[in-house]
Image: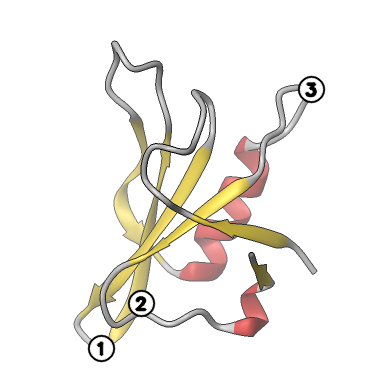
Amino acid sequence: MHTYYRYRGGEQTAGALIIRFYHSGDQIRGYIRRVADPAENDTIFPGEEVEPDDAFRMTENKNQGPDKQPIFVELSEGVEWNPAWGKLM
């Protein structure tokens, strides 16, 4: 089971990955962004919304190698954590 960390604005370093979940109609969708240096804009992947399982899988794939960092999750208003997704700290 994967462990994820609750996103709290401004605490993440450059290179950190954040999954933001939100409601799209009656479904939960998400997008991924990589935190950039303060002088640059964050990178958003992908340009379209994805289902939670796909967002987690894509984020894990982008978070490989020696620079691996914790993965953060931002839950928009009304979105609750699903324990099946893993552990949220």
Residue at the spot x=66%, y=37% of the render? 63
Q: Residues within 10 Å of mark 3 (few under 14, many from 20)?
A: few
Q: Give 27 or 83, whichever is nearer the viewer.
A: 83
Which residue is at the front of the view, 89 or 15? 89
Give the image location of residue 33, x and y in percent: 40, 40
**Location of residue 8 in the rendering, given as x and y in whole percent from the top left corner:** 42, 51
Which three-letter amino acid code belongs to the residue tagged 3? Pro
Q: Residue at x 63, y 83 (%)?
A: 83
Q: Amino acid at mark 1?
A: Asp
Q: Residue at x 63, y 74 (%)?
A: 85
Return the x and y of residue 30 as percentages of the image width and height: 37, 61
3D distance between C-alphas at marks 1 and 3: 38 Å
How far is the residue under mark 1 from the one under mark 2?
7 Å
Would you say 55 lies left or right of 46 here? right
Residue 28 - label: 2
Which numbered dot is residue 26?
1
